[in-house]
Image (cartoon, rainbow, N blue to C red):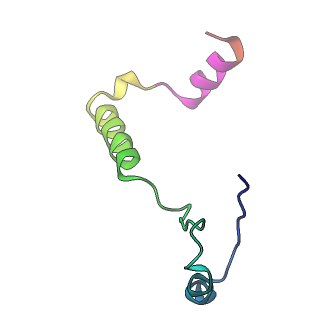
Amino acid sequence: MKQVIIRLPDKKMDEFLKTIQNLDYVQVSDPEDIPEAHKEKVRERISKSEENPERLISWQEAKSSLKTGL
């Protein structure tokens, strides 16, 4: 299956969708839409970090451990 991404100005979107709405294989999605389950997971992680800030490490520590594999 091939996928085609078409970038349209907002003012042209409705017109374009009306043109292709009868095609069974067309799926419209907005890449800026983040699933609610993903948002909830991030909220949980933020909450855990706020409750226990000592569980976090700095970016420098993380970067260093990535370089050394530790």
Name the image quarter holding residue 64.
Answer: top right
Chain part drawn in magenta: 57-66
Residue found at x 57% / y 82%: 17
Residue situated furthest left in the rendering: 51
Task: Please state if 28 lies on the left or on the right of 42 as rendered.
Answer: right
The reply to whether the magenta stretch includes residue 59 is: yes
The residue nearer to you, when weighing 18 against 42, is 18
The residue nearer to you, when weighing 16 against 65, is 16
- 21 is higher (above) or lower (below) than 28: below
- 43 is higher (above) or lower (below) than 59: below
The reply to whether the magenta stretch includes residue 58 is: yes
The residue nearer to you, when weighing 17 against 58, is 17
Task: Assign the magenta stretch its main secondary structure.
Answer: helix
State the image coordinates of residue 2 (x, y, percent, origin top left). 73, 55
Name the image quarter holding residue 49.
Answer: top left
Residue found at x 35% / y 46%: 37
State the image coordinates of residue 32 (x, y, percent, origin top left). 53, 62
Residue found at x 35% / y 36%: 45
Question: How many tags in the picture?
Answer: 0
The residue nearer to you, when weighing 44 against 23, is 23
Q: Which quadrant would the C terminus be assigned to in this image?
A: top right
